[in-house]
Image (cartoon, rainbow, N blue to C red):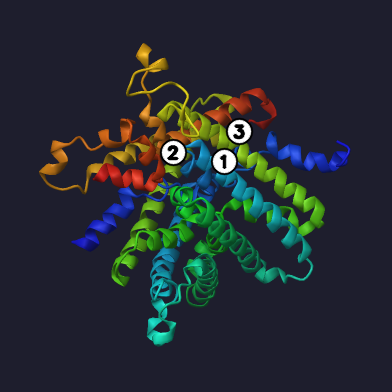
Amino acid sequence: MGLLSKKDSKLILDPLADNNPITIQVLGICSALAITAELEAAIVMSISVLFVLGLGNVVISLIRNIIPSKIRIIVQLTVVAALVIIVDLVLKAFAYELSKTLSVFVGLIITNCIIMGRFEAFALGNGPWRSFLDGIGNSLGYGVILIIVGFFRELLGSGTLLGIEVLGDPIAKTGLYAMGYENNGFMLLSPMALIVVGIIIWVQRSRNKALIEDH
Amino acid sequence: MEYLELFFKSIFIDNMVFATFLGMCSYLAVSKKVSTAVGLGAAVIFVLLVTVPLNWLLDQYLLQEGALAWLGEEYAQYDLSFLSFIMFIATIATMVQLVEIIVEKFSPSLYNSLGIFLPLIAVNCAILGGSLFMQSREIPTLGLATVYGLGSGIGWFLAILAIAAIREKIRYSNVPPALRGLGITFIITGLMAIGFMSFGGMLTGGEEEVKEAPKEVVIEPKDDVKEEDKKDIADNTLKIVK
């Protein structure tokens, strides 16, 4: 990559796989599970987190030397809350239906552990540009998992992707449905999100033995 | 009756962990031992019990559209609800700090057992989630808001207690290596969540529940699936009840 030095590009690429925020660092699970019943919501959520984490990391990194460490949590929360309010208002203005789907989970980006975790672990000790890259990398890693989970849940649960019926019409019995295929409505319910993430973790760790925990 | 209904509903049906996945991060991170899980669970109950009613008051008298009417006519049309995120989180962070100081002063033993968990709680999504759900579900009175806070706290406590106990035992089981730790915890939580879904029909009450098999509504994705999708998981659970 010409634009980024090797060290910088590592900041972006690492969280995508071997240091993934959801499957390895165990951060930001709540929203990952709750809004992935359809792909569109998962994508919007990823973009929101990308915005909040990228900008938030820069802001925190810029003011890191003037925050008294005792009140840093409150300062961090204020910064995130301000950014999340922007996201929320933009969603309400341009994608009202979707903002209803996401409901309180937009607000819950504030307490998404990914954000606080990256602030604490990275932005407080690094310059703005590197923090920005770290924010982008981690939110992309988060987004990848969200989109994978959303993809499978929507495809298997309602036979659609982004609202388009890719497997045929379940009522008119066309496409796959003509052969007796049925949607697995169970995928739309919340417990399956947990199990899908569990399976992703399983696959990832079987491919990379170094990640295996001993209980 | 209303109180009791909301209480049990918030513990079992709308369980924070199993129905809405709130507070999953600390749920996964602090559930390796039962004793620490109990400490964190107790702290969550306590903080939810305090912050939900407090935020209810804020919402009612400061943030909602027309909430400022008590200040006088000219303030009645203000709608400050866009500030609710920042107000709620500020209340929570302050309350957590305050609770920490008070507990440290008056009950050092409780402080020693809860102490390290309290700062963690400010950023626990279960706490903010409690307040946000309280707002979006439009809980009508202060008493109900308190009951809701208490109930959700107890629900969260139950969940973390259960998973901690299971994780202590599973250490001696032969889990596939790649699933050990996080993976198996996710899958067990999923199975527990399925179990908790069976509470769904609990509060329907009367014969109505018997006539229509309640779960069908959600499980069969027909043409109304689009609308189904639009609700979040929490609403899905509500739907089971109806």
Q: Quick check: B167 left or right of B6?
A: right
Per the image, the residue denoted by label 2 is: B189
Foreground mark, 3 or 2? 2
The answer to whether any part of residue A197 appears in the image is: no
Q: Label 2 marks which chain's residue? A: B
Tell me residue B200's x, y (percent). 27, 43
**Residue receiving disc 3:** A214
Q: Which of marks 1 and 2 is in front?
A: 1
User: Contact (CB < 8 A) between labels 1 and 3?
Assistant: no
- Which picture quadrant has residue A57? bottom right
Task: Determine whether B144 is above or below A55 in the image.
Answer: below
- The answer to which of B189 and B226 lies nearer the viewer is B226
Residue A88, x across and y down, in percent: 54, 57
Q: In which quarter of the image is the C terminus of chain B?
A: top left
Q: Residues within 10 Å of mark 3 (few under 14, many from 20)?
A: few
Residue B156 against residue B188 in the figure, above or below: below
Characterize the local packing of mark 2: few (<14), some (14-19) or many (20 or more) Cα atoms within 10 angstroms.
many
**Mark 2: which secondary structure?**
helix
Tally the marks: 3
Residue lying at 43% horizontally and 74% vertically, measured from the top left: B58
Q: Quadrant of the N terminus of chain B?
A: bottom left
Disc 1 designates what residue? A43
Alpha carbon distance from label 1 to label 3? 33 Å
In the current view of this chain or complex, which residue is farthest to the bottom? B72
The amino acid type, in three-letter code, at marker 3 is: Asp
Please give the chain letter of the residue carrying mark 3.
A
The answer for how far apart the CA atoms under marks 3 and 2 are is 19 Å
Give the SS element for disc 3: loop
Amino acid found under the numbered disc labelled 1: Ile
- Residue B68 visible to the viewer: yes
